[in-house]
Amino acid sequence: MPYEEAQTLCSALTGGALGSERLHTFVHQAAEGLTVLDVAPSRDDIARRIAEMATGRLRRPVVGLGIDGAYVPTRPESARERQSGQRHSRARRASWHGQWRDAKGFRLSLIDAERIVPLLSWHQVHNEEQLGAALQQVTEAGLIPQDQVRLCVVCDGASWIWKHVQALFPSARQVLDSYHWKESLHTVAKVQYASSERALEWVEAPLTRLYLGKVGWVLGGLRRMQPASEEARKALDNGWVYLQNHRDRTHDGKWRRGGYPIGSGGMESSNTCIGHVRLKRSGAWWYECNGNEMLALRCAKYNGTFDRVFARHRQRLRKA
């Protein structure tokens, strides 16, 4: 919750008066330097959840890995500087300009036909190399016993995501999020046909073929189509290239029969619950450092390691 609400609630519950600035300082102290391994569940805890899911089943449980980014509002470090002007004068518009930055993250979840059990989430405002390093830390720590689960990676078509997947999880099942390949075909239909009814009639065929794994038929059909306009030509070329690049990741019927997820809804939910709910409040603009600390604490909350983070903070205070 916002610091002002936390200040009011804390005072009402404890009787102790704390200012919002003190809460700022406390959050910074508790979250400073947190890494993905600090907020991740232990290997034993993850193994216990996997064993519970595997009880009574013939096949190994499915662990889904989603990777995605979501924009959050940030402010530059220059906004910390004291602004010129007289005190008690009318407030002026801030001289700094906010920027929407990509908070990249990943989520690991146990999945079966009846439920989804979140295992590990990690979100930070950082670049793709730093995200790859965090994934590598999780892999090297052995948090996910890949010999006991069927790992499935569900992502959109971003090349940087699949680069890390190929390097770190070469044996994982790779699935292109169904919404994205369906969107590319609907884009073709929209610009190729003037009538919406005709567009929907056409798009049903390639959608069905892709579901059945007949990617070659769809690619051939796109190549044979006569574009109705220059815009349609670009859409056809883009759609063909997109499906060609991910032709081994679009067999949704096969993935469903195997119990694998075909959509990235779990990852989108993680973006919302961990990032959007707290960082995208009205008028909020975050320094990158402060935003990452808040994201780390919220990851700990949803990973079930919140108490462990504060135990770490108490140990640091004792040493100091």
Image (cartoon, rainbow, N blue to C red):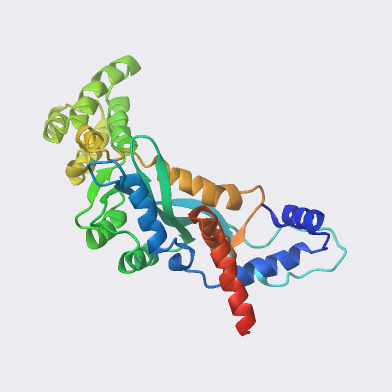
- Residue 66 in sight: no
| Image position of 25 (left or right of 240) | right
Residue at image position (23%, 52%) is 172
Q: Provide residue 281's location: percent of width, then percent of height.
A: 63, 48
Residue 246 visible to an observer of this rendering? yes
Q: Is residue 213 left or right of residue 72?
A: left
Asked where in the image residue 131 lies, by quadrant, the reply is bottom left
- Residue located farthest toward the bottom when viewing the structure as drawn: 320
How many numbered callouts? Answer: 0
Quadrant where the image shows the C terminus: bottom right
In the rendered view, would you say 169 is above or below 35? above
Please identify the quarter of the rendering in which residue 138 is found.
bottom left
Say which residue appears at 55% left-offset and 66% top-offset: 309
Q: Which of 6 and 235 is in front in this view?
A: 6
43 in relation to 118, above or below:
below
Q: Where is residue 54 in the image (x, y as percent from the top left)?
A: 31, 46
- 74 to 82, vertically: above or below: above
- Left-right relation of 277 to 93: left
Q: What residue lies at 35% left-to-right and 62% top-to-bottom?
A: 143
Seen from the viewer's position, the closer of residues 208 and 49 is 49
- Farthest front residue? 56
Q: Where is residue 142 in the image (x, y as percent from the top left)?
A: 32, 65
The percent coordinates of residue 104 (x first, y second) are: 43, 56
**238 lies left or right of 22:** left
Using the rendered view, name the quadrant where residue 170 is placed: bottom left
